[in-house]
Image: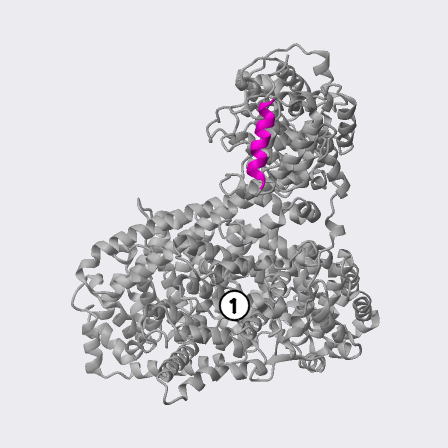
Amino acid sequence: MTPPARSVNTQGDAPPTDQVSLLAPSRGRDGRSLSSAATSVMAGSRGGASYATTNAPPGSFSSELRPIMSRDGRLRPEFDMHAITVGDDSTTTTEQRQADLQDQIDKETKIKIGSENLLEALNAKNAKNIKDQRQKVEEELSASNRKLAQLKLGLAAEVQRAKEIKSPPADPQSRLSYLFRRNISRSPSRHVAKKEDDEDEESESPTLVLSDILQALEADGMQPEYYVERANSLVELLKRHPTLKYDLAWSIFGLRMQTMLLSDSREVVAAAYRVMRYAITDRKSLQIIRGLHTDYLVILSLVKESKASVEREQALKFVRAFLDVKDGVQELSRAVVRIVVAVAEHSDDRLRNIAILTLTEILVKRPPLLVAAGGMGTLTDALGEGSYYAAESIGTSFSFLLDTPRRRGFLRSGHELEAPFAMFTDGGGTHGHLHEEKLKANAKVIATLIRSWPGFLALCMNDFLAIRSLLLSLQIPTPHVRMVILELLYDVLRIKPPSWSSSFLAGRRLTTYGRVTNLKNENTKDSAKGGAAAQTENETDPRSKWNLLEHYVSVVLAVFLHAGLVPALLQAEEDPLSLTLKRKTTLLLGEVLKMANELLPPSWSASLQVLPQLLQTAAKFHDEERFVAIGTIYQVDSVNRTLYRSGHSSHSTGKTTVGNDNTASNRQTDQSKAQAAMQMEEGQFRSLMFDTQVANTANYTKWRWDLVQNLIEGPLLNAKRLEEGIKTTKFVHRLLGFYRPFKYRFSEIRNTKPNQRYVRAGCALMHTLLQNPEGVRYLSDSKFIRQLAECLAHFDRMSGLTSESPIFQADRMENTLTGGYFALLGALTKDPKGIQILERWRVLNMFYHIIELNDRDDLIKTLLSNMDYSLDGHLRIIISKAMTSCSKDIRIFATRLLRRYATKSMQNADCSIAEWAIKLLVTQLYDPEVEVCEVAIKILEEACNQTQSLEFVVKCRPALDHLGEIGAPLLLRFLSTSVGYHYLDGLDYITREMDDWFLGRNDTYVSLIEASMARALAEGDEKREITQAQASYDDVPDVPEYGVVPPHFYRELTRTKEGCKLLEQKGHFDEFVATIRDFAMEQEDAEIILKVKGCLWAIGNVGSMELGAPFLESSDVVKWIVKIAETSEVMSLRGTAFYVLGLISRSLHGQEILLECGWDGVANDSGEALGFCLPVDFKKLFSIAPWASKSDDISWRRKADVKVAVTDADPVNARILKLATDLGNTVLAKKAANDLQAIKAKKAPGFTKPAIFHKVMQVLEAHHFRLPACRFVLDLFDKRVLRQIVLEEEEEEDDDSDDSGSESDQAGTNGVPRPI
């Protein structure tokens, strides 16, 4: 006997929703006797160990791979995967866990920044009732800091764990033993006993355990829990021994699964689906599984009511498992996909979202199947309805189809991408919060479409109809609609709102901002203090970093301007729905005008800047509307002036070059202010000193620290005033006493961002005292340095000084301002006189002892990061020692610290600082840890932006062969100078690398740059801001820059005359040109398209150099590139050509050639090319002919086959088939259902015949039906019909039935036609 057969229309009790694991797996065994049938299951067994690898457990809701957890909790690697699996249906991978941790870190960082800003605001107030508020905020900040530290430790541990798992042992033998450590069969006598259950399972051969479980499944009449436990045990076995599924004898295993799938219990059926998922290996195994009639079983499971949730969920996971196998989608039948479409259309179904995701994956992998199953309409509805929150994935899939003409035909109407715009243009009815959420979801979809070339070009069809409809929606008088559209425009144009925008939107006037006008001065000061950033930007090669993202933004901006963005914004200004919306529109208008001036050719921006529509209205003196126009002009002008004063720019490249002039003028202003402060009169000085409250009270919380800072940085720089502050008053004495360690005042203050003002004041005091001999003498003899030296002496074992609670212990360093003492000592190291003071009190000796500590990395990092290494002496020895003898983390940290010195300009008289740093970095290239070498490479690469630094690096003659790909970017930089060229030529590097790029690296470069652009477009500005906020100046090289043109061999080669000569001799450029001429209009072959893209990038990189102009002039390749950009049928190829034309426009010669071809370039006020270009006839770039779908591509079967399915010799059966067909007609459905019920009541024999069931399934496959209709018609059949079909027990019928049945048998193994 077997478990009771299930009925098609069984209505059992649904299990609880949390019973996803399908009951706990059994730990025991039910018997040791083996039947001959069970023993033969593992025919051809490999003895329990196999070299075959496995894929992840198929069919999960996540498309990524997941880790597998061994029995003892250890993660085991799978060497043919990029990720590792944990648990059965766990949706977490190591990458996902890292992403989750990073998201939590970003969230906590926002909380921390907000708390710090609030503390600053509270400290600025002098009210007496804010003490409790400040204490509460400080507690919140401390909690946030602790949580941040824990999250960062967790992230670091996760990254390290992933590295260890992904890296198998180097020794092959140890690798195999590691891989099969838990798989080797062990006899019970040699097994170490832990628990009885574990002992039995671990000591058993997997072959015998499998036979044992299948033997147990033969039992009949048992409770459902019995079968579920055995099935879960079988899954655990397949997870522990992944190679076991390759040796299954499907004749026995398949029969057990069929029996379970026919059970009345939903849990048993779900368990069978789960076991089969884990038994899938390749496409052949899928064919065997389909031979078990699983198509019918899956359909019957999916049409059940929602209370059969476990069974339906496992059935859908089983379908998704087909997508995880190579070419597995070819084994999906149209009938199954039809049912998945029906589930996706059922709005109340809990499986709807995952059904839509499944259809999306099928669309990418096999579009004809989805189109034939009627799924395109379902996906189009999901794209635009706003309730499916992963609609961006559908938009990406549609963009994928749009790329090539052949795939484009599957989008029959060509208007599928316009679905998300419909909700914006719907202005009628009442709108609530739900409508706003749907609008935001659709806005994300629209942004995703615009960020891909196929989607963007499709939206620009029909004279930019979709874009114009979006802009016209700004006229709808609904506040949240306008707000969402404005936010969308900010996002699409990648506009980063200035820091004062929130105050401006809240209603404050621009003229009241005291800090806005000085914002640029503050930034200048910060960059001057940092030293590295400000110098390298102005003095490096401007072509070192080319941002393709800005070029893309320029064409998006041009499209919106062409579609009427400025008139739409002006009309929204005239009809403001609220003050916030009016100001947001004004701010956007100012940003758009500024961007147009920076990114677009003069022919575009000149006519925009005057706002002709507003001027015309303002000139109508007899019209009252002129006052609104005048007010708008004033607001836009005010915003523009404020943007200019604040130095805010949404993009790094622009026409204007006012930044350098302002920096110089600001520096002169600061110097004049300082000189005026030094010449302060005595009476004014004493009054200011009295106002600080320092001399009046010893309570530092009552001091006016802003005045203290101004006093230190101004009047006290005057020797006479300093002498008065030291000898006449208690000012300097009390101020310096505040910092003395043993007074426990400064060292007990909590470590928060607002409290850093005490550290800044202390550093300024050190600097001021070192400027005058009297101050040096006073500081040298003060107790401050003496006590600080005593505290540091605790780290010297020979000093004999100990303390129960050292001031520099780890918890005090983290929670208080104790670490600020190193900042004060660092201020002393900037001056030779300060170094002498430190040497007098043996402080530098203590630094050597601190570096040797093995358990205080926090102290070492604080010490190294606060010191100044500009002066040659002990400190340089200390950091070099840290870079070579400390732990890996310290070596990486110390290496990053050298960035600010290695990137200094070498044009100054004192270039020894940069030379010293570069020498140390070259030494780091030989560090045993690759991570250290990688950091050094990145810093050296940045330093090589300056020609002098590059030549000095070449003089150091670094050996980079041992670093492989890591050192390649630095070697490419060497090519940009003649010195580097000859150095590499002597190593025979150039010819080898040149051949390598010509033969294959060009194609790899295409994938690299396209992935970089996709990542850059996907990441938001907010994410980048948080990343930069978390990274200090020494971490900047580790922040990846997406959207920037990666180094290209041919570009670097063309920087020198020697390289150009070699390129001409080799003839590679001519080969690239020939490839483009021959295959420019290729539409289908993916390999040829990739080759053309590689040649385009090579030509673009060569043409971007001034020395590359002769190569462009000697051929007509630019005309071909323009032709590709304007007429190619492959949309991604158009995008590549557009970017390449931007690269060519980087050189003035290239701009001249482009102008001849009808493209206009952009140059700044100095006449330098910026790399932005647009066609003079703008519509040419978006000229795409409408396409028509070809019925041949989506035909599934001949119409005659469908006609055969709906006919039968028996008139009752024919009536049943006709009525089943009518269920798909909404007009006839109700009458057809009543008639079918009547036929069922008469006990018609057709509902008990497998042949009619086959034909009904063909009807369901051939036509579109709703899920309830499918359920209704299948529930009419007798429960024995399915058993007869699955177990192939069909009885002999009359001749007519045989004839009609033979038709259906031809369809395929399951009675469901095989896909073509």
- Where is residue 274, by image quadrant? top right
In the image, 858 versus 362, the foreground residue is 362
Residue 367, percent across and down? 68, 49
> Residue at point 77% right, 43% down?
1198
Q: Is residue 857 visible?
A: no
Residue 267 placed where, x, y %?
54, 25
Q: Is residue 411 above or below residue 260?
A: below
Residue at (49% x, 69% y) in the render: 472
Identify which residue, 1009 or 163, lies in the foreground.
1009
Write the start and end of the magenta stretch as one range: 1228-1242
Secondary structure mostly taken by the magenta-highlighted segment of the chain: helix
Query: x, y (%) of residue 838?
Result: 38, 63
The residue labelled by disc 1 is 493
Callout 1: 10 Å neighbours few (<14), some, many (20+)? many
Residue 605 at x, y percent in the picture: 54, 81
Q: Residue at x 49, y 70 (%)?
A: 650
Number of disc labels: 1
With 1004 as the anchor, is 885 left or right in this view? Answer: left
For badge 1, the amino acid type reads: Leu
